[in-house]
Amino acid sequence: MEIKVSKNVREMPIEVLVISKYEDEDTHFDFVNKYVVEKDKFEGKFGQTYLIHTLGNLSADKILVIGCGKRDEFNQNKVREITSKAIKKLNQIKAKKAAFDFDTNIDYGKQAAIGAMIADYSYDKYKSEKSHHLDEIIFANCTEDSIKEGLVIGEAMKFTRDLANTPAQLATPERLAEIAKNINGIETKIYEKTEIEKMGMGAFLAVGQGSVNPPKFIHMQYKGINPKKRIAIIGKGICFDSGGLDLKPASSMLTMKDDMSGAACILGVMQALVKLKPEIEVHGIIAACENMPSGSSYKPGDILTAKNGKTIEVDNTDAEGRLTLADALCYACDLNVDEVIDIATLTGACMVALGTFASGIMGNDKELISDLIKTGEESGERFWEMPMFKEYFDSMKSDIADMKNTGSRNGGASAAGLFLKEFVDDKTKWAHIDIAGTAFLDKPQKEFIAGSTGAGVRTLINYLTK
Ligand code: BES
Ligand code: MG
Ligand code: ZN
């Protein structure tokens, strides 16, 4: 789908013209006011749609009227939602070309482009019958720049969703490393198993040791001109989470190819940074491996030593994400960056607490957390702060090591956060985002089809380019 900008589309001969209709207001088109508004009582409530053939009365063959709600309540997030709605409708009627004429003074291009790309997304690479896609859409009265920015974010989300939707048989640690190496404008170093051993990443290595696919530690670097800040972003990169010897039941294992959604997010963000060129230094870090049961797997009761020397008694091999992140966090802090943000499909407990509607967020710096929450709101993603009370750590105390990797089932998202905190030094501002509930949908939700959502991509790009 190509996205273009035009000054005026009202008189354009086009297959479908999409127009806005606010509550208690007429549109710019007498034809629409007479038939759709007066006769058919279309109110223009937010999200309502009405498709009408113009039968030669207007230059467009069809008009798709989109309800925008009250004009003074219209905002960027609503632009994205209604554009998505319109695109889904256009694809349903198998339209090939459409123009959008939103009657608003806000420069809506960025969110419209993102909304269009979210809605036009399908994952049908392996299906004989492909879904319908528009060839071209044109937006009127918005700037080229805002559309361009939206396209970069839309493309990053598509990239991330494609990667997280890819079956684990293909999206292996090696494949993630290859993708990282091939991002133009990014400097990438891949650490192989022996080098990971040399770095002392005993926690990460243990998780990957049961798989025939070797682990890869990926360090990408984007360096803008005159960097004002240095930030590390870490993505959980478990290419498949079977649970390990503490094997998951079949129903929970079914979607575990998505356990590298954090890593896919980081890869999407890194390639977007090259295009947006913010004045900042960003380190993208992924400890990629598979959590598999086998004769060489790590075992409950094993004691692991992380990069910072702390020891961990393995209580449950299915709490593997925090082990890989522990070493990645140590590595990131050693880079002496100002901020570290990790994003991970970390705990089922977070999904139980917040459902699929919000990601959990916690960390050691109030300002960083509230900045991310605010950027999320503006980007159309919800983050909800989870508590970090020290008592959540109590059940992870071990008699034979510095800590265990799990404890009580209660408060699981916060406990995981406190575990991670053990591997962050005091000088580094840190935020942890748990996307277990938001990264992958069982059924369609709002603008999204089932499968990967690209959770975190929009917010991280907007945060890093602010
Ligand atoms: N990858 C899972 C968490 C997860 C669950 C992600 C559901 C997406 C959807 C993680 O590695 C895991 O297995 N966590 C365990 C931790 C437990 C053993 C303490 C969990 O949440 O059950
Ligand atoms: Mg697990
Ligand atoms: Zn996992």
Image (cartoon, grey):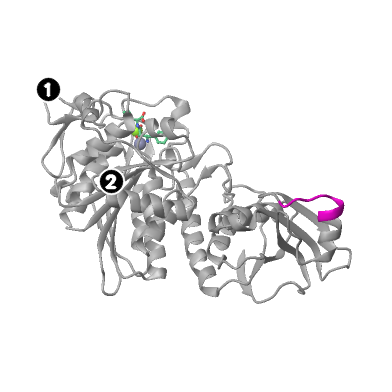
Residue occupying the point 60% across, 68% down: 105
| Residue 298 pos. (x, y %) | 24, 31
The amino acid type, in three-letter code, at marker 1 is Asp
State the quadrant of the N terminus. bottom right
Mark 2, Cα crowd under 10 Å, few <14 / some 14-19 / many 20+, is: many
Q: Kindly indicate the quadrant of the structure image that contains residue 100.
A: bottom right
| Residue 61 pos. (x, y %) | 82, 65
Q: Earlier in the sequence, mark 2 or mark 1?
A: 2
The reply to whether callout 2 and callout 1 are in contact (CB within 8 Å) is no
Q: Is residue 224 left or right of residue 73?
A: left
Helix, strand or loop under label 2:
loop
Is residue 157 among the parts visible in the rendering?
yes
State the quadrant of the C terminus. bottom left
Relative to 368, residue 406 above or below: above
Is residue 166 among the parts visible in the rendering?
no
Helix, strand or loop under label 1:
loop
The amino acid type, in three-letter code, at marker 2 is Pro
Confirm if mark 2 falls within 8 A of ligand 3: no
Residue 391 is covered by the magenta coloring: no
**Foreground disc of the pair 2, 1:** 1
**Mark 2 sits on what residue?**
215
Residue 38 is covered by the magenta coloring: yes
| Residue 300 pos. (x, y %) | 23, 25
Figure quadrant, ligand 3: top left
Q: Kindly indicate the quadrant of the structure image that contains residue 395.
A: top left
Q: Which residues are magenta?
A: 37-44
247 and 368: which is toward the camera: 368
Q: Main secondary structure of the magenta part?
A: loop
**Mark 1 sits on what residue?**
399
100 and 39: which is toward the camera: 39
Residue occupying the point 33% across, 62% down: 181
Q: Kindly indicate the quadrant of the structure image that contains residue 17.
A: bottom right
